Amino acid sequence: MTPPRPMPELVCPAGTPAALKAAVDAGADAVYFGFRDRTNARNFPGLNFSHEEVRDAVAFCHRTGVRPMVAINTFPDATDETPWHRAVDTAARAGAHAVIVADAGVAAYAARTWPDLRLHLSVQASAANPEAIRWYRDAFGISRVVLPRVFTVDQVRDTIAAVPDVEMEVFVFGGLCVMAEGRCSLSSYAAGRSPNKDGVCSPAERVRYEQDGAVMVSRLGPHVINRFGPGEEAGYPTLCKGRFKAGGQAGYLFEDPVSLDAGPILPDLAAAGVAAFKIEGRQRGKAYISAVVKSLRETLGGGTARVADRQRFLEGGRATEGAYRKSWR
């Protein structure tokens, strides 16, 4: 008889030490967090960890039986890789369970300098086929790949079958970005700072809200991203989720402002062989972390009572299963 597959681990975000504690208390199996600098793809003011705080966070995770993962998932400058190498060194010396890398050069440094350090490949690397995954495995010993958010359940299953010796991790809740992850230049164009190199998408310092009569206008830098009528909630002006006019019609050309919630299909993803379910949201607060982790933990156990708890945090009040079911454009 074939032994049952182990339950996928629940990998939870932490943008602050307080959020990390909330994730652990709520039942996380693993927590991912990053440094307070450009090495981290969520490099926003007021978030993230100093090098000392990373060491403390790793130690706290070890004491509580949770696996700490450090995200070093942006692309270094051509002339100075020092901050990225230092981040790898700090994580390795602290005893992190894994570092999550996007750049091949950072992966090479980590594999060469810390051969016993477990390496996970960030979704920012856009490894979207078995050939790419095999290359990262063979070149750097990558143990796990975070798959892009454009796969159907069948494609997830086929990828796992094609590379069975590499673990696959998928997003199951939170902000839904299906732009070419690690390759998107929209925010760089509009705001002058790169998600891929600076770790900032639609930076808050370039955001403005202006009242135009009864209409609320949201801008990113000089660009109008959306116009909200009376009674409409004025969402954050992320460029890819802006409402623009084309062909005489206004609509969301790139992405709708809606959140991923794959809760209903977690059994399908588990049956496909997924090793870990990932929650997006390192920029979110403790209430989000606690409610979403507890809700998904209960869902994994077959319960449904806490579904509404996580749905309170959906962007635009709407959820989708995204590309997993191809029910979302």
Image: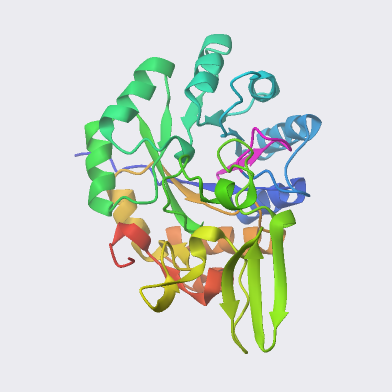
Q: At 51% from the left edge and 23% from the top edge, which residue is drawn?
A: 118
Q: Quadrant of the N terminus?
A: top left
Q: Looking at this view, name the residue that lies furthest to the left.
A: 1
Task: State the image quarter where residue 196 is shown.
Answer: top right
Q: How is the image coloured?
A: rainbow
Q: Position of residue 312 (x, y in %)?
A: 58, 74
Q: Position of residue 54 (x, y in %)?
A: 73, 33
> Which quadrant of the figure contains the C terminus?
bottom left
Along the viewing direction, whichever of 197 and 30 lies nearer the viewer: 197
Magenta-span inclusion, residue 38: yes
Residue at image coords 45%, 51%: 171
Horizontal and vertical percent position of residue 29: 55, 44
Q: Main secondary structure of the magenta part?
A: loop
Residue 36 shown left or right of residue 299 in the figure: right
Res 4 → quadrant: top left
Q: Nearer the viewer, residue 40 or 204?
A: 204
The reply to whether residue 12 is in sight is: no
Image check: 103 left or right of 132? right
Residue 254 in sight in this render: yes
Residue 86 lies within the magenta run: no
Q: Which residues are magenta?
A: 29-41
Residue 279 vs residue 81: left or right?
left
Q: What is the quadrant of residue 321 in the picture?
A: bottom left
